[in-house]
Amino acid sequence: MTDYRSVPITEVHPDTIDAVAAIHMNGIASLLGDLGIEWVKVFYQHSQRNPDAIGFVLIEGDAVAGYVIGAARPEELYASLRRRPFALAWTLLTKARGRMRHVLTAKRSVGALTGKPGEVELMYLTINPAFRRRGYGSIMIRTFLDAARERGATCVTLSVEKDNEPALGLYEREGCVKGQLIREGGIERWRMIRVL
């Protein structure tokens, strides 16, 4: 396998936001994605400026091949969406009707699962489908774990869809352990933990 320290990885920055948002929209089903690409961009723009966030992109050639983002207080990253309450309400009514209840309760869901001292939540990790099966998921996890450890974290937590066998296998290979099975945003997910 490729030495993950030799792969071109950089922190998320303004020039990568559009590519990260597009990968998010095409790569994972999420409550955030239900709001549409403009809201996904708002989330990543805010995250990129938030000192609590840990975010990286993996570059291959001229393309963003994947990204990872997380934080010790993930609810603060979602706060950027609530700063525009009328626009958010309109989007919920027009785009995310079927999952509005789940979007509105997402803060409570995320906040209840995180925020313990020393804990960092890995919120999103996605590899562009054109770049999968190259070991980049492992590279992104290892980069994120190293950064969390450098910030003094003692563990990383995450949620993964119960039926997403490739992601579950990846996280387990990287030392994450399944915990509680929860319902988050109307989807059953495993909570996982990786002690650092």
Image (cartoon, grey):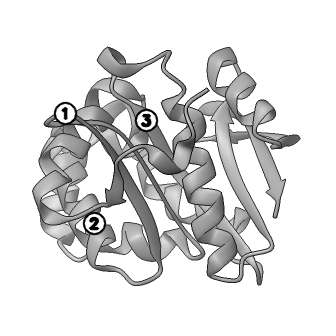
Cα–Cα gap, marks 2 and 3: 21 Å
Q: Nearer the viewer, residue 170 or 146?
A: 146
Residue 17 numbered tag? none
- What type is the residue that disc 1 sits on? Gly
Cα–Cα gap, marks 1 and 2: 32 Å
Q: Which residue is drawn at the image coordinates 57% and 57% (left, top)?
A: 144
Q: Which residue is drawn at the image coordinates 40% and 70% (left, top)?
A: 77
Q: Nearer the viewer, residue 29 or 57?
A: 57
Residue 74's spot in the image, x, y percent? Answer: 52, 68
Q: Nearer the viewer, residue 93 or 141?
A: 141
Residue 76's spot in the image, x, y percent? Answer: 44, 77
Q: Which residue is drawn at the image coordinates 33% and 26% (left, top)?
A: 128
Q: For residue 15, which quarter of the picture?
A: bottom left
Q: Which residue is mark 3?
A: 126
Kindly check if marks 2 and 3 are in contact, taking CB atoms under 8 A apart as contact.
no
108 vs 69, left or right, is: right
- What type is the residue that disc 3 sits on? Thr
Q: For residue 166, which quarter of the picture?
A: top right
The answer to whether one can see residue 102 in this image is no
Q: Which residue is mark 1?
A: 61
Q: For residue 175, which quarter of the picture?
A: top right
Mark 3, secondary structure of its residue: strand
125 vs 183, left or right, is: left
Q: Which residue is mark 2?
A: 81
Nearer the viewer's eye, disc 2 or disc 3?
3
